[in-house]
Amino acid sequence: MIAAVAMTVPMTLVHLSTVDIAIIVFYFGLVLTIGTYLRGQSRTGEDFFMAGREMTAWIAGLSFLSANLGSLELMGWAAAAYQYGILATHWYWIGAIPAMLFLGIVMMPFYYISKTHSVPGYLKLRFGEPSRALSAVSFALMTVLMSGINMYSMALVLKVVLGWDIHFSIWVSSATVAVYVALGGLRSAIFNEVLQFILIWAGALLIPILGLVEAGGWSNLRLQIARNASAEYTHLWSTLGNFKDNPMGIHWTGIVFGLGAILSFGYWTTDFLVVQRVLSAKDLRAAKMAPIIGAAFKMLVPFIVILPGLLGLAVLPVKLTGETAALATGGHSYNEVLPLMLARYCGPGLLGLGITALIAGFMSGMAGNVSAFTTVWTYDIYRALLKKNESDAHYVAMGRWCTVLGVLISVCTAYLVMSFASIMDYVQALFSFFIAPLFGTVILGMLWKRATGPGGFWGLLAGTLSSISMWAWVKVDPAALRYVALSANARDMAENMYRALWSWIVCVVVTIAVSYLTKPRSDAELNGLVYGVTAIPHEAEVPVYHRPAFWATVVAVLFVAANILFW
Amino acid sequence: MHAGGISIWFFVGLSLLVNGILIFGAGIWEFVHPPADPVVLFHLHANVWWGALLLILGSIYCVKFAPGRKT
């Protein structure tokens, strides 16, 4: 359906000037230059897959966040803000900040001290080969699907906004990412992600600033939204007491326990796409600080994503609709809100920078997926299961070819995704299939020394299968929603939250049960992997303002204050 | 972090500098030759001051993290 919309759009939203084209061309030239320049820095496996483990906290932190700022973040959540109001902010605040702080303070020491190169690699050390194989295969599958979604979203936006051919966009962008990641490995991906992060802000920040000027400030914006849509659209928590009281059709328990406690922790602490960036940090303190720096900036992202969606509700002269209605009426869909706002305020030059920001977001997300896929494929599937004793140079060569292969698979996925009606719901479903159970396995592995290898494997498998089963159950029988999401009034987002929660519980219960039935490993074997039997370096000699715990507390206080402010 | 002598922040500065020059130049051109169909809030000339801001920031980063310079 979405593809059909793209193919039938009669005219483009904006027209680029020569200056705009020059800015976009310069961006492509610069990222390729960086990739080419860094080729000589990525000769060993440690260089290519882990960026030499020499990133500062700032580089790793910005890269950690930038890898997540893909097309779905920029376009999808601006659209969600127009559709559901400020509730979409939950995916940036409670759906990210606590988990990122937890990763930095609690989990990072175990990832870092174990010297693992990946999350599946940690599972190998903690639970054995079967758990690694299961998580590596599921991660590789999810990653190429995500990458394909990213790619398709970008091509669709460029088609709708600029009128560019959808196939041209897919192949040019994917070839660019393939070149700079294959040449420079993770180092090149991280360098470009930092550059892309800055460009995203430089290109997108003007929209909320000018939007607030036009709307007459936040108070007037709320009044206009109340008039054009509903006053509920500007409240974060006060409408979550009942499924029927808010535009998202969700209950606060789903947001707090499904999103905040399970999906968020699963994504930000076990998805190797983001964790890989932090593992490249130069020392433990940098590794702990990186997610905290990422969390501080994550709290600000709604300003350039959610606020434009809300501003669209107030100032756009046209009413945006769903894809189907937009197709039927020839109007604009929710997904076009960010480009529409861009076209509203940005003249020559600024428009090019705004489009560059969108492309940078798409490419950083795609590069993140591809570099993570390359590492997991090479280390956790190819080396672990297919060719065990090859030279380091052989694995680096495999990594370079795998980058190209990963991009090609993503391109194929992008064409497959064209047949799906809702990209965002599809991604949410994927998250709950794999991420929520994986978080159960990893967190038990890190915090509970009694967890055994068989317990970890069967818990992960049971959690994943239960999630897929619940999804299939609701697809076959929509009435099952009342059992899965606790209410027949729940919508897709709510269903995903609760499915994640149940699959995590299944994973944890099965892991605990099987662990008690099997023989535990000795404390000596678990040294460096589990809380209680691992010596974590103290920071007593470091001034308070240099300690990760101090900055985590500052971010946590700001997080609570922001939620109260927009209650 | 440096890669063989060139800091990532130099690349960031270079990007901001070039974008700033192009956007500022386009803004000045529009200021002198106002378009027939201007964007909303055109009178604020966002591309002039935003372009100038990027240009200044880019220049600072390019100088501070120039290749070969000790930071």
Image (cartoon, grey):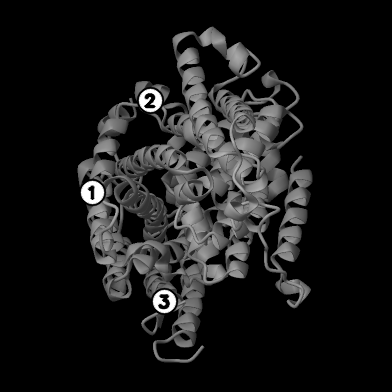
Q: Position of residue A552 (x, y in %)?
A: 71, 59
Do the residues bearing badges 3 and 1 touch, measured as CB atoms within 8 Å? Answer: no
How would you rate the neighbour count of disc 2 (Cα within 10 Å): few for under 14, some for 14-19, many for 20 or more? some
Question: In front here: A480 or A91?
Answer: A480
Residue located at (55% from left, 27% from top): A496
Indicate the amino acid at tag 3. Leu
Residue position for label 2? A421
Q: Does residue A472 lie above or below A312 as drawn?
A: above
Viewer can see residue B41: no
Occupied quadrant, residue A234? top right
Q: Chain of mark 1?
A: A
Look at discs 2 and 1 and give the one toward the viewer: 1
**Circles 2, 1 touching at the beta carbon (< 8 Å):** no
| Badge number at residue A405 | 1
Looking at the image, which residue is at 48% across and 59% down? A277
Q: Which residue is mark 3?
A: B17
Q: Amino acid at mark 1?
A: Leu
Q: Amino acid at mark 2?
A: Ala
Q: Residue at x 31, y 73 (%)?
A: A38
Disc 3/disc 1 C-alpha distance (Å): 35 Å
Q: Is residue B28 above or below residue A388?
A: below
Q: CA distance from mark 2 to mark 3?
A: 41 Å
- As rendered, which of A140 and A5 lies closer to the eye? A140
Tag 1 secondary structure: helix
